[in-house]
Image (cartoon, rainbow, N blue to C red):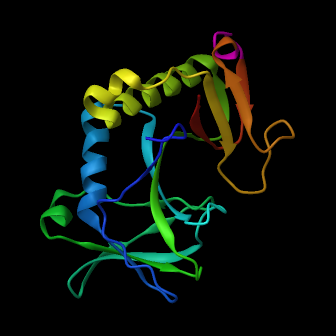
Amino acid sequence: MRLSFIITMLALTTTPAQATPFNLGYSGFYKYMSKVEKAKVEHAELGFYLSRTDEQGLCSIESGIIRVDDTLKGEVEVLPHGQFLLPYDKQLDLDKALVELEVTDTEQCDISIQIQANLVAGDVSMAQLRQAEDEMYRLLQKMAGWPGRYFVPELKGIKLHPAKPGQTLNGVEQLKLSDADLADERTLSLPAVRITPWF
């Protein structure tokens, strides 16, 4: 597991090509979402992305659907920062559903997972941010399994990213808060943010 804790899902079958679509088995995603359910966390989650194999950022997803054979089961929501959302549905797992993403990039893409937390815009206390950090760390341990959980490095703090591309936080694209910062009891006024672990 890389220190960035973006986990490449080699177990998923992908069909990269020069043209769309990019096809993925739903069951691989369901397995990971089940671990989040068992972790019983409020804020922490797994964010699904398509990363470029040349490590130059994310592949561009125009849209996506979920289907079982030729039957449409739903649409995939793609967020502005590149994350795509999937439902947690046991029946789709049993039916061996297929996730079909329309990808505009011609380079090959890999599925990656980011352990993260999302907060809506507003006043956020350090206590809320500490809770998010604690949940992400517990989820990291859950994902690492045994004995990997005993080798997960301690966090230095958290990183805050604007949920909407182009926004900044106090004039910077990424705001880092150390554990010492989080020990404070002040409140921050923030736009909607995505939180990731800082190692």
Question: Can residue 75 be spotted in the picture?
Answer: yes
**What residue do we see at 65% from left, 44% from top?**
192
Quadrant position of residue 42:
top left
Horizontal side of 111 relative to 167 (left or right) equals left
Q: Quadrant of the C terminus?
A: top right
**On screen, 120 above or below 52?**
above
Give the left or right position of residue 103, taking residue 111 as reference: right
Q: Position of residue 185 (x, y in %)?
A: 67, 10
Residue 106 position in % (x across, y down): 58, 83
Q: What stretch is highlighted in magenta?
A: 181-186
| x, y percent for residue 119 | 57, 38
In front: 165, or 112? 112
Is 148 or 127 nearer to us in this picture? 148
In-image side of 172 versus 176 (left or right): right
Q: Quadrant of the N terminus?
A: top left
**Percent x, y of residue 187:** 70, 20
Q: Residue at x 65, y 34 (%)?
A: 159
**Residue 93 lies in what quarter of the image?**
bottom left
Magenta stretch encompasses residue 185: yes
Write the residue at 34% across / 26% down.
149
